Image: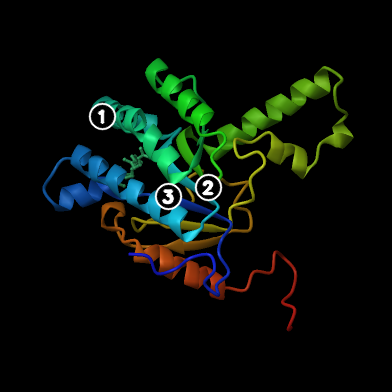
Amino acid sequence: MMKLNSSSKLNFPKHLAIIMDGNGRWAKKKHSTRSFGHRFGVEKFKSVAKYCGKIGIGHLSVFAFSTENWKRPPEEVKFIMGLFEEYLSKALSEFQGENFRVNFLGGKTLLSEKIRNLIARAERETKSCTGMVLNIAANYGSKDEITRAVKEIAKKVEAGQISIDQIDETLISQNLYTDGQPDVDLVIRTGEEKRISNFLLWQSAYAEYIFLDTLWPDFKLEFIDDAIREFSSRKRRFGGIAIDS
Ligand code: FPP
């Protein structure tokens, strides 16, 4: 199935972010385990990423695991990490096949050595891919990311490499995990909740939001088409006024 592509007469988002919520509730409704929901969630993520690449989305960011998700029961955290490791160990050829350049958002120290190595390898071996940039947020939190950026910049000021006057929005953006990428212009969140949950706060300052009640495993590829149509029809003024006002 492929209905849209970037030559469709629509204004495509440059950077789409997706909060894939609702795996647990989906599984519960099916009288199954949360783990089953997460496994299904990964499969859904794979097909959505592939579709976004095909229709010409330039940058896709997905929230796989947040800095707050460590508060879940240890067995669930262990399962998700196992799933992440399993996914990463098989995904490299898929990334290359789809021409995805992968980039991981989040602090690496809390991740296992195996996962850290798989992340480093995926980033290294897809560096020259020219298709969609796929940002996978794992152990990611926006407040944590901004705190790290502030520390990095403060270190440079302390070392006398830059002056306080040189701190501007560009410098802050350059110290985030999305350095060099366009700001997020469309965020889709599934799973009924209508909140941002510490995802790409700086990058999505002017993003459009689409909240869907659908639980992530029930997400359909045509929802991407619908979201792009909706995005394309919204008037984005960035704090200014509409040209025709
Ligand atoms: C959201 O559902 C899922 C998570 C926070 C963690 C796991 C994410 C995936 C399995 C999909 C992506 C995976 C990869 C490898 C990129 P939830 O557990 O918050 O559901 P609930 O709100 O219904 O409990």
Q: Are marks 3 and 2 in contact (CB under 8 Å)?
A: no
Taking 235 as reference, is 39 left or right?
left
Q: Nearer the viewer, mark 3 or mark 2?
A: 2
Q: Nearer the viewer, residue 91 or 115?
A: 91
Judge the density around disc 3: few (<14), some (14-19), many (≥20) Cα neighbours within 10 Å. Answer: many
Location of the C terminus by quadrant is bottom right
Q: What is the three-letter code of the residue carrying label 3?
A: Ile
Report helix, strand or loop for mark 2. loop
Give the label on residue 131, or none: 2
Give the label on residue 19, or none: 3
Q: Quadrant of ligand 1?
A: top left
Which residue: 46% across, 29% down? 122
Residue 129 at x, y percent in the picture:
53, 40
Residue 170 at x, y percent in the picture:
76, 42
In the rendered image, the vertical position of residue 87 relative to residue 224, given as above or below = above
Which residue: 40% across, 69% down? 3
Give the label on residue 79, or none: 1
Mark 3 to mark 2 CA distance (whole Å): 22 Å
Mark 3 to mark 1 CA distance (whole Å): 19 Å
Q: Toward which corner of the image does residue 218 lie, by quadrant? A: bottom left
Mark 2 to mark 1 CA distance (whole Å): 31 Å
Q: What is the three-letter code of the residue carrying label 2?
A: Gly
Which residue: 82% across, 24% down? 157
Residue 199 at x, y percent in the picture:
51, 45
Location of the N terminus by quadrant is bottom left
